[in-house]
């Protein structure tokens, strides 16, 4: 297919990526022409890197034997990467006839290079190796990345390696050197208009595009300050649009009454903004459980939201020890540190250790102090959270469990918020970012009585 036709089709399918498509097609050229040894496609997540490059090669190489696409997450060892590449370049498909075997066994780089020489020795066209999430190659040995980037020199064949990553080249460059800098193609953030052009492609076939575009614009204005991820915005549009348009079918409003529709859908907007990225409930489950919540119901029913449905279940879908880490984080955020010995010392019953206190002048007119659940979570040291975790866990923690990785996962999911400086290696502090109802649901799922360990939570 001519390059101009490919560029036109891809530019229509991927708004805002015309410059990157033209740059890639210029680098690829015609089959058989010299190409760069390596191409480095980088940029933030959800900016179209993988989708654009895969679609480009599917049109550029219709037969699918001149390029190999591998994901470093799936191919987590060099051998898997080598054998997946050879299968793609030779058109070999593991099946029952060949006992699901690969084209050739490649245990190491030497075997891979020798096999590539045999396969491509009589081929003149350029062959491409596309590696997604290529930053993981840095942990696969000191020479793997350098060798892949110089594959054309090692094999004497016309091979180009395309690396797709979210890491800039300065942090990607091999420490020992040995590889020339690749040709970089940057995928930047989308502008507002580009995001709207992409989201409007998800318009249902039986809905007016202008009305859907107005809704998409409102979604962007509400969420773009907290959410720059295009995939998350598409997920929100898929979840919220049926609820937004539901009053129209129930004769509660018309399509021209956009302000009224927005007001009726506002509880869902608020609930979704509190649970960005968590995906506590799927789109299909959301549509199933929220059918009773509409403009015809009471306001209490309308507030049936993602947040409440997630809390009405058995808690977040987290690993067993991660749930206890989150419970420990909540206790560290809301309990005074001076009471840790009273609550978490082995052999003590915290429910029997509480002493009655006299009413003081610091109590307000309602008879209560500035209670911690009203003031919000306090920052705590990671060491204190771990001490509480090892105190409340019933059995010894398995040696195969990496607690530090699970803490990092909680921070990534925004269940914990890091409050200390990003470059600080010791004395890291965090805050717990879940509500009391959520942590109670999590505690029930692991049969832990959290109320016995909470201070001043009547």
Image (cartoon, rainbow, N blue to C red):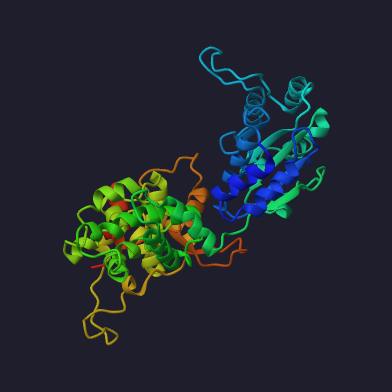
Quarter holding the N terminus is: top right
| Residue at point 46%, 68% (across, down) | 379
Left or right side of 359 for 427: right
* Residue 409 position in % (x across, y down): 49, 51
Residue 89 lies left or right of residue 203; in this view the side is right
Q: Is 302 situated left or right of 50 in this image?
A: left
In front of the other: 231 or 82? 231
User: In this view of the protein, which residue sits in the foreground, 400 or 75?
Assistant: 75
- The quadrant of the image that shows the C terminus is bottom left
Q: Would residue 413 be visible to someone looking at this image?
A: no
In the picture, residue 361 is in which quadrant?
A: bottom left
Residue under the image location 54 percent in, 59 percent down: 194
Residue ranking furthest to the bottom: 361
Q: Position of residue 218 (x, y in %)?
A: 40, 66
Instruction: Find residue 272 and report its horizontal and vertical position in percent.
Output: 36, 60
Residue 78 vertical placement versus 45 (above, below): above
Residue plotted at (53% across, 12% down): 97
436 or 238: which is nearer to us?
A: 238
């Amino acid at each position: 297919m001519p390059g101009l036709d490919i560029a036109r089709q891809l530019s229509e399918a991927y708004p805002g990526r015309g410059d990157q498509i033209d740059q890639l097609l210029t680098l690829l050229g015609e089959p058989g022409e010299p190409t760069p040894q390596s191409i480095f496609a980088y940029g933030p997540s959800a900016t179209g890197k993988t989708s654009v490059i895969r679609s480009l090669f599917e049109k550029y190489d219709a037969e699918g034997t001149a390029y190999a696409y591998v994901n470093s997450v799936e191919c987590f060892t060099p051998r898997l990467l080598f054998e997946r590449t050879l299968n793609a370049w030779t058109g070999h498909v593991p099946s029952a006839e060949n006992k699901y075997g690969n084209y050739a066994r490649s245990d190491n780089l030497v075997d891979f290079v020798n096999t590539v020489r045999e396969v491509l020795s009589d081929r003149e066209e350029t062959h491409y190796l596309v590696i997604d999430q290529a930053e993981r190659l840095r942990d696969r040995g000191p020479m793997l990345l350098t060798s892949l980037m110089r594959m054309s020199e090692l094999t004497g064949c016309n091979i180009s390696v395309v690396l797709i990553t979210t890491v800039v080249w300065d942090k990607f460059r091999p420490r020992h050197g040995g590889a020339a800098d690749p040709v970089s193609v940057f995928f930047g953030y989308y502008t507002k208009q580009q995001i709207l052009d992409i989201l409007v492609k998800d318009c249902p076939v039986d809905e007016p595009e202008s009305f859907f575009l107005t809704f998409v614009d409102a979604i962007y204005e509400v969420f773009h300050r907290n959410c720059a991820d295009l995939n998350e915005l598409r997920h929100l549009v898929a979840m919220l649009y049926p609820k937004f348009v539901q009053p129209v079918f129930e004769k509660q409003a018309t399509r021209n009454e956009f302000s009224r529709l927005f007001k009726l859908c506002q509880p869902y907007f608020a609930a979704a903004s509190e649970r960005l990225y968590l995906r506590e409930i799927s789109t299909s489950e959301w549509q199933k459980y929220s059918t009773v919540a509409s403009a015809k119901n009471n306001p209490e029913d309308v507030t049936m939201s993602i947040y409440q449905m997630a809390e009405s279940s058995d808690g977040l879908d987290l690993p067993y020890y991660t749930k206890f880490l989150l419970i420990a984080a909540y206790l560290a955020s809301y309990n005074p540190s001076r009471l840790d010995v009273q609550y978490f010392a082995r052999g003590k019953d915290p429910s029997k250790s509480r002493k009655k206190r006299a009413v003081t002048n610091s109590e307000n007119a309602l008879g209560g102090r500035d209670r911690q659940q009203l003031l919000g979570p306090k920052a705590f040291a990671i060491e204190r959270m771990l001490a509480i975790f090892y105190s409340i866990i019933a059995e010894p923690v398995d040696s195969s469990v990496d607690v530090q990785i699970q803490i990092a996962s909680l921070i990534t999911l925004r269940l914990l918020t890091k409050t200390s400086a990003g470059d600080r290696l010791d004395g890291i502090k965090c805050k717990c970012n879940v509500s009391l109802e959520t942590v109670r649901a999590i505690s029930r799922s692991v049969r832990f009585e959290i109320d016995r360990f909470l201070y001043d939570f009547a």
